[in-house]
Image: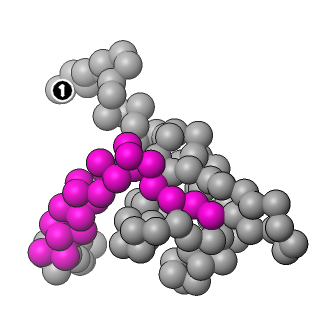
Amino acid sequence: MKKRIVIEGCPLRTVMDRFGDKWSILVLQTLGEEEKPMRFNDLGRDIEDISQKMLASTLRTLEECGLISREAFLEIPPRVEYQLTDMGKSLLPLIKNLIEWSTDHLELINSACATKNEK
């Protein structure tokens, strides 16, 4: 039996626990594609299947982690804009690589999963 190694304070686990979910990656990618501040409703439109509650929660987490900034304007009606911080921008090339890898391997992964499920 192989012994599981647990490393205290593992950077990858810490990072993935904070924003490794599917919505965070999609929000970061969407903000990166626009390259300009975006409003909440625009993000919600661009990420079609995300609920308002999940979008709000994801934006809050990404802001707390320092990957996006939030600017509220004292106007009527109120306006809030989100954009990537420098740290968030530094993550974009890695997200793009993950998207490319996923695109290149999706068919193989689906095929392997289907074969395993048939057994």
Q: Can you say whether 95 is above or below 47 in the image?
A: above
Q: Residue furthest right?
A: 76
Q: Position of residue 62 (x, y in %)?
A: 53, 48
- Image position of 63 with respect to 83: above or below: above
Q: Residue at x 33, y 24 (%)?
A: 10
Nearest the camera: 8 or 70?
A: 70
The quarter of the displayed image where residue 93 is located: bottom left
Q: Is residue 25 magenta?
A: no
Position of the C terminus by quadrant: bottom left
Asked whether residue 86 is drawn in magenta, I would say yes
Residue 29 placement, left or right of 73: left
Instruction: Name which residue lies at 63% across and 64% down.
Output: 81
Toward the top, the furthest residue is 8
81 w.r.t. 59: above or below: below
Rendered location of residue 22, percent (x, y): 44, 61
In depth, the one of 115 and 77 nearer the eye is: 77
Q: Main secondary structure of the magenta part?
A: helix
**What kind of element bears circle 1?**
loop
Report the magenta residues as a range.
Answer: 81-104
Tally of numbered tags: 1
Q: Amino acid at mark 1?
A: Met
Looking at the image, is 45 positioned above or below residue 16?
Answer: below
Task: Determine whether, in the image, residue 8 is placed left or right of residue 77.
Answer: left
Q: Quadrant of residue 2?
A: top left
Identified at 46% across, 68% down, the residue is: 36
31 left or right, relative to 112: right
Name the residue that disc number 1 marks.
1
Task: Indicate the quadrant containing the N terminus: top left, top right, bottom left or bottom right.
Answer: top left
Q: Residues within 10 Å of mark 1 (few under 14, many from 20)?
A: few
Q: Residue at x 29, y 48 (%)?
A: 90
Q: Left or right of 5: which side holds 41?
A: right
